[in-house]
Structures are given as C-alpha cells and as structure tokens.
Amino acid sequence: MRASNETKSKNRDSSYELLRLVCEESAHQTKDIFAGQISQQAQRMRADIERVAKRPFNILITGETGTGKTQIARQIHRLSVRASNPLIELNCANLPEQLVEAELFGHRRGAFTGADHDRKGLFEEADGGVLFLDEIGDIDSGVQSRLLKAIEEKQIKRLGTNHYQSCDVQIVAATSRNLPKMVRNREFREDLYSRLAVLTIETTPLRERREDIPAMIALFLNEAACAVLGPAKKHSTFLLEDGAVELLREFDYPGNIRSLRNLVFELTSYLDDMDQISTELVQLALARLDTRLGHIDCGVKPERFAHTTSFANDLTALHRTENDLAELQLFVNSIAREGDTALPLELCILRRGETFKEWTARAKRCAIEAIHQTTGATMEVVAQRLGLTAYSLKGHLQRARRDQNPALFEWRRESGKVE
C-alpha cells in the first residue's frame, strides 16, 4: 500500500512539474510582452526593443527592480538575428567573485575547492547567441576586469587553465543601479560601462504608466488560470468584480510588475474554480501589502481602505472572513521582512499534555520544514541558513523524530538531501 501511495505521489509531482514547464514555455514564447498596453511609455519601450534588436551591439537595460528587464532581454533575443542560437542568463546579484568567474568562464577540475570536474562557462554555452547578465552593477571589481577583457577580445579562459578560446557572444546587461554614479564613485569601471552601454533601453515604473495595469492584470489572471486548470483550458481565466481593477490601478507597487503579479496570484489563491475576485478581497490584500511595506506612501488613498487598514492592529477583523486561520497565517507572512521565514501558527499553542521538550522538537521541525519549503533548497542549504552543519541538522531531525510523527519527516528525495 505504501509503495502504491509513493508511486501515486511521484506521478502527481511529475504531472505538476510538466504543467509548470508547459505554462512557463507558453509565457516564454509570448510574441509581444506589451500586448494590450496603451501607454506612451509602453509604445516607446516596444519601439526601443525593435530598434536595438536589429543591431549586433551590446545592450544595457536600466530601470527599477521588477520593471520587466528580463522579459525585455528575452524579447530582444527573439527578434534578433541570433534568435536560433542560445540565450543564456545569469543573475549576478550577491554572487561571490569566484562563483561569478566560474559561471562566466568555466573552470578546470581542481581549480578551486569543490571543482571536481571540468565545466563550461556561460560564455562558451552562449557562443553564437546572447548572454544576459542581470544586475550587472553587483559584480566585483575583479570580475569586471575579466569581463571587460572577454568583451574586448572575444576570448575567454577557464579558471585553472592558460588556454584562451574564442567566443562570439552578444552581451545584454541589466541593472537597477545607477551605473554612471557608480562610475563617478569608482565603484564600476568606466571602460566596462562604455562597452556594455553601446545601445540602451530604460524601463518605466508602473506608477508612471497606470493605464497599462489592467492589461497586465488580465495577463496574470490568465497565467494563474493556466497554472490551476492546465494548458488545455488556456482560454479560461479568473475574473474581477467591477471596481476592483480601479483599486489595483491606484496602488504604487515598489516591486513594479513583479509585485503586481504576486498580488494577482495571491488573490486567485482564495478562489474556488473560476469565482470572481471581490472588491473586498482586493481591499484586504492591498491593506496587507501596505502593512508589509511599513505603511510607506504607496499612492493608496487611506479612506479607500478605512475598514481594512486597521486589521494590522486589530486581528479581530480577520474573524469576519470564512478562512480565519488561513487569513491569520497570511497576516503573519505579510509582516515578515525580505529574507525572513514565517513559521506556522501552530507553534503558538502548547498542546494539552505536551512537554516543553516535545514542543521544542516540534518547533525545530517546523522551522526546518518552513525554510526548506520557502527556499526549495537542498538540506545542505537549509543547514547553512540555520547556522548548522549538515551533520548537526541530521541530529536535530533524528531527535525530533523521537517525539513526533515520523511521517512528518518523509520529504521527497532530492539531490544532496541529508537522510
């Protein structure tokens, strides 16, 4: 029986993974990322993409975080003469110098600790195509020098070797930072900046093109329906009540398109089948987002949310909903800052007959599972997040098993998981 259940679970996981890949591929193949958008800024960005995509020069995309720089890079690749060749992407944010170098240029076995085999770099993989470097402003000065040399000479050298090889790569870079200011402060090489910014595109934040928000909402509602119903019903979509769209238009999204997309997906998570998203639900979600942002000025008129913004200080408001516990957990999630992990509300209860030792074991198990689920990382990464070694984490799990249901620890096998 257990083997049969495990087989069903694996098949279900495989189906979900296939559905995710199909939906992502559908989104990736979108012909016009500005479909339905009517603002002058959207038209300008579309014209800029078509203009630079016809040229073989390096391109720099600038703009605030979440304004669609990655999608623009992919659109440039789709419209360029290199469209039949690879588009390779690397997010440079917060990567150590050695790791960025290894990713870009590859390495030879034994070049550094953990390099147990030869590996191609992204320059080699992108040969003949486009290499997209996101958050280029975050790379270390040492990597800047090597990147400049690779761009100028169109040659790269793997870490641990003295052999150079040619690579024909067009660079599309993006950043949310002010590179000219970084150049003036000697934080970014001027010669590298001039090599990257041959052609430029600047993205526009949502607050400056609110008329495009309804079209984006429609797109994200369709994406959410695709994820729930599958590609066979790709023309089905979630709906919004009259007035809800106008509320969403009035909000200033610090994360721009990414924040709007996350909010729409969150709204659809409350619905069964294809129910409408109510105006009240939108008000509650916007009030929660406003609270999460620390009550900064997000362009929301306070009077529009007079009966919901107080819920951050008056949790009894949550009991007016049908899903009290889910709402309360969402509130806990909403007040967690970036990088925090929200733990389950069940830890607030010391169960009848439960000893402190048993509660501690349950708390450890919940913390480990929460980090594992939110990051999707291997158990080695979870151990590092908790300041533990993999061996120590294994010990904590084994001790917790003695006081908890063993089934709670039967995570799916994954590469590098600690057993």
Image: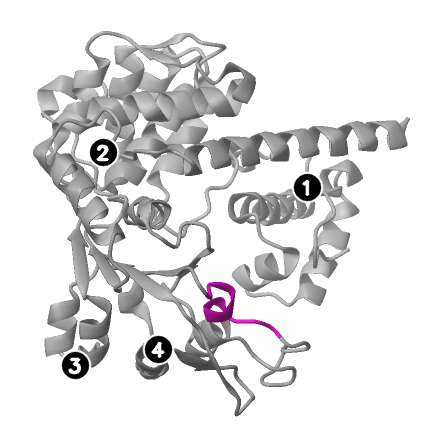
Q: Residues within 10 Å of mark 1 (few under 14, many from 20)?
A: few
Labels 2, 1: front one: 2
Image quadrant holding the N terminus, namely top right
Q: Residue at x 64, y 46 (%)?
A: 365
Closer to us: 62 or 283: 62
Q: Can I make out residue 311 in this image?
A: no
Amino acid on which the number 2 mark rests in the picture: Asp
SS of the residue at dot 2? Answer: helix
Labels 1, 3: front one: 3
Distance, label 4 to label 1, CA atoms, is 58 Å
Residue under label 4, please give it.
147
Q: Can I make out residue 213 in this image?
A: yes
Q: Residue at x 25, y 43 (%)?
A: 255
Residue under label 1, please give it.
355
Labels 4, 3: front one: 4
Magenta residues (range)? 119-127
Amino acid on which the number 1 mark rests in the picture: Thr
SS of the residue at dot 3? Answer: loop
Label 3 near label 4: C-beta < 8 Å?
no
Q: Residues within 10 Å of mark 3 (few under 14, many from 20)?
A: few
SS of the residue at dot 1? Answer: loop
Residue under label 3, please give it.
186
Closer to us: 328 or 162: 162
